[in-house]
Amino acid sequence: MIIEARSLTKVYELGGQTVRALDGLDVDVAEGEMLAITGPSGSGKSTLMQVIGCLDRVDGGTYKLAGEDVATLGEDRLAEIRNQRIGFVFQTFNLLPRLNALENVELPLLYAGLSHAKDRAAAALDVVGLRDRMHHAPNQMSGGQRQRVAVARALITDPAILLADEPTGNLDSKTGEEIMALFKSLNAQGRTIIIVTHEPDIAAYCRRQIHLRDGRIVQRPGTSDAPGRI
Amino acid sequence: MLFWVIVKVGIRSLMANKLRSLLAMLGIVIGVAAVIAMLAIGAGAKKQILSRIMAMGSNLLIIRPAQNQSRGVMSGTQQTLTVADAEAIAAQCEKLGIKAVAPVVSGQAQIKYLSRNTRTSVTGSSLTYLPIRAFEVETGRCFTDPEADSARRVAVIGPVTAQNLFGFNDPLNETIKIKGINFTVIGVLKAKGDQGWFNPDDQAIIPLSIAMKQMFGLDYLREIDIQAQDGKDLSVLEGEVRALLKKRHRIPETGTADFEVRNQADRIRELTDTARTFTFLLGGIASISLLVGGIGIMNIMLVTVTERTREIGVRMAIGAKRSNIRTQFLIESMIISGLGGLIGTTLGVATARLIDWLSREHPTLCPFPASVDPSSILLSVAFSAIVGVFFGWYPSRRAAAMDPVEALRYE
């Protein structure tokens, strides 16, 4: 199991009210899986994603990434994990506006302190079919192209897990399909992919789906997944 | 590698907000320029003071009769210094480490040449006077020892006096009347420039004995100039000369002297101390503007950090450590202050040059010359870099302390 999470709890104080974004959630993800996390807004799916992506820490429970208990790791080590083992793809792409496509893709390698970053970034843009756009700034590209740049950036350090938060939310359906097809082919090459979405069409691309409600995994008719299924 | 990318990104984000970056930089530009210009004025004033003192001659002790004082009221000078005193000091030259001694009398007198006349100061002294007071003869010659001894009527005149009397004609070997006595002009002094309180270029120098006996009718000297040998401590010499004169004047060692000794080293120290205080004051005021400039940078950096919250979140998500974020914003603030420092240095040096030029071309507009000390450039550039680090520190820490989840959610 690349991800082993047991009774994850995350509590927020919001306007004097206590919100349990994660409420004793168990989930395991095997290497090479393509998993969709669905659920209504406020169900905790984004929080789960941030916890899996080592951006956020839980208040209770244990989360092991590739056998390593994340709670014991320091800030710098977490940054290294985000850099090396996890690739993020966001709904709003989150490319840095002042860098061109190539420089955006290159950035994780620079934080990793690697050389030949330019060549590798160019190769990654080639994989997502944007070699001829590498010197364009994000605002000179379409939404689909930007998201592909973001995917290239997520993949540049060859991470084990690709985390996508509503990756097609800002794209039209045709472009969304293209991005999903890209994810599918990446998964076929053995990459673990976790997609957070509220669109059933998008979730349908994934072999396994889990549904969240009030910080817990719930059974849904028509899906094979059960809470805490191993 | 990462460093250069950060610098590149920093420059780009500064370029994206050109006006804002420029305004942030302006504080530092003005601060650095002001510090450099003010220190240059201070250094220039010090140089001017030193050159004026050196124009009087170097390693000087000047002995003058003391002021008569009765019940706190000054009433003329005492008539105590004699040629014999000067000779007694001169006799001890070797022992005391004295290079030269010159007895001096002086007064104002009318000088006439044909129909022209001018009123100027007349100095009677021995031929040692010129080298002691750092005068050089431009044309002609100085009088010789036999001339001085035999009271020959010869005069060396200053260039301004020569101009006043002779216009553009050659004054050499012409006969002038000083207080009605005929003198032959044998030399013209080299110009020193007006020293403010006294113009050494407007005077006539004649042999001592003539000046004392025939011109002013004096038995007493106005001053004795002593030039110490190089390396002789002036205050030690002052003590020795005091002791010698007190003994000659039969004054007990603890008694009040009937003469006063002006020590040039003390005078230099006094004046350079004043110049230094002046420099510190100007530099201090100027560095306040550098401080204000630094606060301006901090303000802009805080705005920048808030504006780029989302960028910070993204960078953290793709693997930036907190130290990377901190470095990035620190470098950006250092670019602002460093660039500001560079522009300010250029501006400051240019201002100092302008002031210096003004002081030479239009001395009434600007009495002080300015001279840029290379160390003041180094100082202010270093200071501006420190300002960048100091005032960039807090904003960059704030950037680095952000919670990545919050930062990514920031609209």
Image: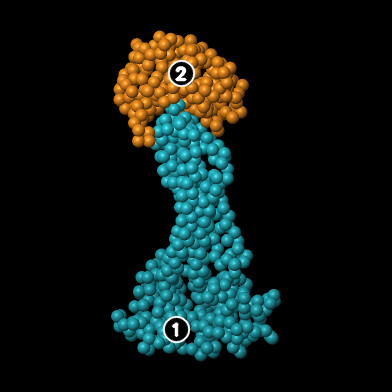
Please tell me which residue is depicted at 55% across the width and 15% down the height of the picture.
A177
Q: Nearer the viewer, residue B389 or A28?
A: A28
Q: Position of residue A35 (x, y in %)?
A: 43, 14
The residue lying at 35 percent from left, 27 percent from top is A20
Query: Residue furthest toward the front?
Result: A221
**Is residue B296 shown to the viewer in this render?**
yes
Q: Amino acid at mark 2?
A: Ile
Q: Nearer the viewer, residue A4 or B367?
A: A4
**Chain rendered cyan:** B
What residue would you read off at disc 1? B83
- In the picture, which chain is orange? A
Residue A195, numbered circle: 2
- Secondary element at image label 2: strand
Going 46% across and 88% down the picture, which residue do you hit?
Answer: B219
Q: Residue at x 39, y 36 (%)?
A: B401
State which quadrant residue A83 falls in: top left
Residue A213 in the image: state x and y as whole percent. 39, 20
Instruction: Note whether A216 is above or below B77 in the view shown.
Output: above
Q: Is residue B378 visible?
A: no
Mark nearest the camera among 2 and 1 is 2
